[in-house]
């Protein structure tokens, strides 16, 4: 199907403490079993610790966010006179430019340098602001790389968020290969046609909008101008997680391709499994496996190239849990 084992592993930046490097303020690490056991075989890690990179020692005085949650300062807890937000933001911008070949980033949650959301931002009264903020390094990095799939390790323990993030990593890697081969009008249309059903599952509205964007392409339009705009919108759209309802809609669309090929019993069996998935009785992999079985017996070139059928290697088992 879609993701081939022949492709090089996608490269993912990751907070160094998550893969067991002892870089935390207390000299420890936060090794993630999920990253080290489930994901490591599939990705090349690019470990980063911004605090060590800007010259803070190990161990070190812990740092925290203070002030305006939208633009907090980063100070040492014992020596609040030193502000590290400038160096951390600068390093974030520098790494965003430097790590050109990554296809995703897994950040350490709650960290004043790396947390993506809900990081405590302390106020003058000594209490954190209710809304929380973003780590200084992560904020600067993500502002420069808005299309890059990013997630916090803590959120990856949710099977739906994990499946969504990793689908986006592989889509991002796929686009990088297309750019390396040369962005033509035909390549852009073929790429979109592969991602149609994944888009329909994640974001039906964006599915229609991106279809219109490419449908209105004129011969004289420059793919170098339309391509990046298309890809930005695609990556934003795929951030929405598919629901059982939107998955069922796609499964029904796919089963429509077999309406003349299957016996009434086969059709009934497929509808039963789609219904059981919709009710939450079986995971997505169950109706999908039957659909792929019918696709092998009744090949359809348009369906066979759909990213939706295999947006990531089957051995990751991500659809056994959604």
Image (tube, grey):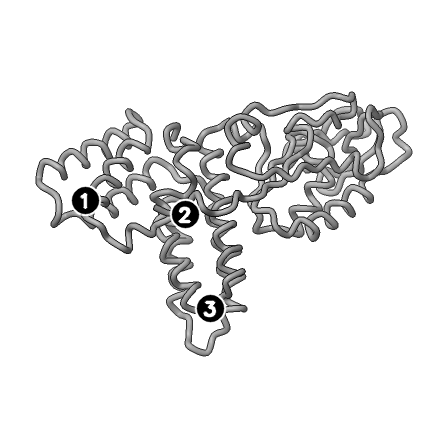
For numbered disc 2, what is the local secondary structure?
loop
Decide if residue 115 is on the left or right side of residue 274: right
For marks 3 and 2 on the same chain, the one whose residue lies earlier in the sequence:
3
Q: How many marks?
A: 3
Q: Nearer the viewer, residue 212 or 10?
A: 10
Q: Is residue 287 above or below residue 238?
A: above
Say if mark 2 contacts mark 1, CB within 8 Å: no
User: Can you tell which mark lies on residue 90?
Assistant: none
Q: Residues within 10 Å of mark 3 (few under 14, many from 20)?
A: some
Report the residue that reaches farthest toward the left: 264
Q: Quadrant of residue 244?
A: top left
- Nearest to viewer (mark 3 / mark 1): 1
Write the residue at 29% across / 39% down: 248
Residue 243: horizontal and vertical position, in percent? Answer: 37, 37
Residue 173: horizontal and vertical position, in percent? Answer: 51, 49
For marks 3 and 1 on the same chain, the one whose residue lies earlier in the sequence:
3
For numbered disc 1, what is the local secondary structure?
helix
Q: Nearer the viewer, residue 181 or 307?
A: 181
Separation of marks 2 and 1 at Cα, in angstroms: 30 Å
Write the residue at 58% across / 43% down: 11
Write the residue at 52% across / 32% down: 39
**Where does label 3 land, which residue?**
184
Q: Residues within 10 Å of mark 2 (few under 14, many from 20)?
A: many
**Where does label 1 land, which residue?**
297
Residue 200: horizontal and vertical position, in percent? Answer: 36, 49
Decide if residue 226 is on the left or right side of residue 296: right
Residue 231: horizontal and vertical position, in percent? Answer: 50, 57
For numbered disc 3, what is the local secondary structure?
loop
**Where does label 2 land, which residue?**
203
Q: Quadrant of residue 67?
A: top right
Q: Nearer the viewer, residue 146 or 133?
A: 146
């Amino acid at each position: 199907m879609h993701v081939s084992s022949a492709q090089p592993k996608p490269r993912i930046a990751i907070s160094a403490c998550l893969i067991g490097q002892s870089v935390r303020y207390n000299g420890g690490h936060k090794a993630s079993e999920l990253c080290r056991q489930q994901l490591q075989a599939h990705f090349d890690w690019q470990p980063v610790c911004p605090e060590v990179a800007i010259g803070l020692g190990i161990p070190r005085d812990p740092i925290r966010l203070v002030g305006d949650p939208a633009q907090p300062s980063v100070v040492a807890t014992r020596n609040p006179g030193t502000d590290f937000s400038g160096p951390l933001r600068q390093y974030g911008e520098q790494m965003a430019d430097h790590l050109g070949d990554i296809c995703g980033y897994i950040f350490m949650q709650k960290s004043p340098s790396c947390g993506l959301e809900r990081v405590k931002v302390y106020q003058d009264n000594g209490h954190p602001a209710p809304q929380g903020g973003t780590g200084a390094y992560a904020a600067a990095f993500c502002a420069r790389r808005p299309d890059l799939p990013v997630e916090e390790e803590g959120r990856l323990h949710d099977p739906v968020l994990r499946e969504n993030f990793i689908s986006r990593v592989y889509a991002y890697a796929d686009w990088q290969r297309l750019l390396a081969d040369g962005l033509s009008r035909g390549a852009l249309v073929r790429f979109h046609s592969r991602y149609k059903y994944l888009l329909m599952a994640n974001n039906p509205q964006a599915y229609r909008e991106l279809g219109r964007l490419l449908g209105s392409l004129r011969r004289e339009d420059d793919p170098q101008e339309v391509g990046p705009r298309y890809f930005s919108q695609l990556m934003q759209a795929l951030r929405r997680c598919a629901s059982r309802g939107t998955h069922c809609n796609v499964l029904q669309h796919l089963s429509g391709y077999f309406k003349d090929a299957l016996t009434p019993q086969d059709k009934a069996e497929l509808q039963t499994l789609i219904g059981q998935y919709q009710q939450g009785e079986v995971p997505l992999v169950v109706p999908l496996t039957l659909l792929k079985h019918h696709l092998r017996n009744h090949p359809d070139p348009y369906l066979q190239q759909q990213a939706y059928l295999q947006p990531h290697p089957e051995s990751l088992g991500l659809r056994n849990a959604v």
